[in-house]
Image (cartoon, rainbow, N blue to C red):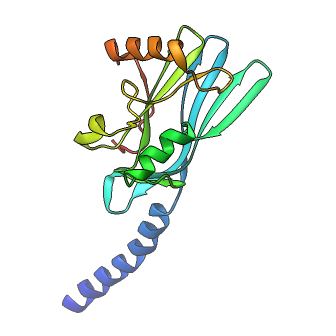
Amino acid sequence: MSSVTCKFKLLLIMWLIPLCSFASGKWSDKTAQMQCGPALVKVSAECQVNQRSPTENICKSYQLEIRNGKDNKVFPLPYIPKDQKEILEGQGYSFNNVVKPGDWAPYTMKCYDNESIVIGYQLGLAEEESIKGSLLSYIDAPFIDLSGNFITGNKLSELRSREIKNPYNNIYIDFISNR
């Protein structure tokens, strides 16, 4: 009887291993969207369960799409000014196609005045507020108009002030958390 039980367990393990391997390697599409004035704003990525932690995903090919009438623009995320990217890279952060927990990952998006958007990112670490060039929406994440241009000057200062006072009412785009 012991031999039959042992063979059964061995067959069960041999059957489950390929199934687990197959399931863990599948990328699935994740999407979040919001209406901002005349534009539909969409963030998308391909994600799969992180094999090291089943409550987290790893994601790749993050994109921001802004559909404004017949004008459709797509940007790879993080979509940030070159100088801000250089500041963050100078602090040891890298921006790869595959985003893992602990990398800057899109977390929220919000529309202002039906003409501007901000995408907030998080690292999943407590120190993200003190990082120079932080991509948190109420620190240094860029504001973007509906044509995909970065907002600068007084308009940026006014929008940032409003975001600092009310960093709520966001659309959540946390694809990394698998809960």
Residue drawn where x is 39% and y is 80% of the image: 14
User: Residue 150, located in which quarter of the rendered image?
Assistant: top right
Residue 153 rendering spot, x and y as whole percentages: 53, 17
- Position of the C terminus, as image quadrant, is top left
User: Residue 120, located in which quarter of the rendered image?
Assistant: top left
Q: Is residue 1 visible?
A: no
Q: Please indicate whether residue 160 sits to the left or right of residue 39 in the image.
A: left
Nearest to the observer: residue 10 or residue 51: 51
Count of numbered badges drawn on the protein: 0
Nearest to the observer: residue 62 or residue 52: 62
Nearest to the observer: residue 149 or residue 30: 149
Residue drawn where x is 35% and y is 76% of the image: 12
Residue 166 rendering spot, x and y as whole percentages: 34, 13
- Position of the N terminus, as image quadrant, is bottom left
Residue drawn where x is 24% and y is 41% of the image: 127
Tell me if residue 109 comes above or below residue 175 in the rendering: above
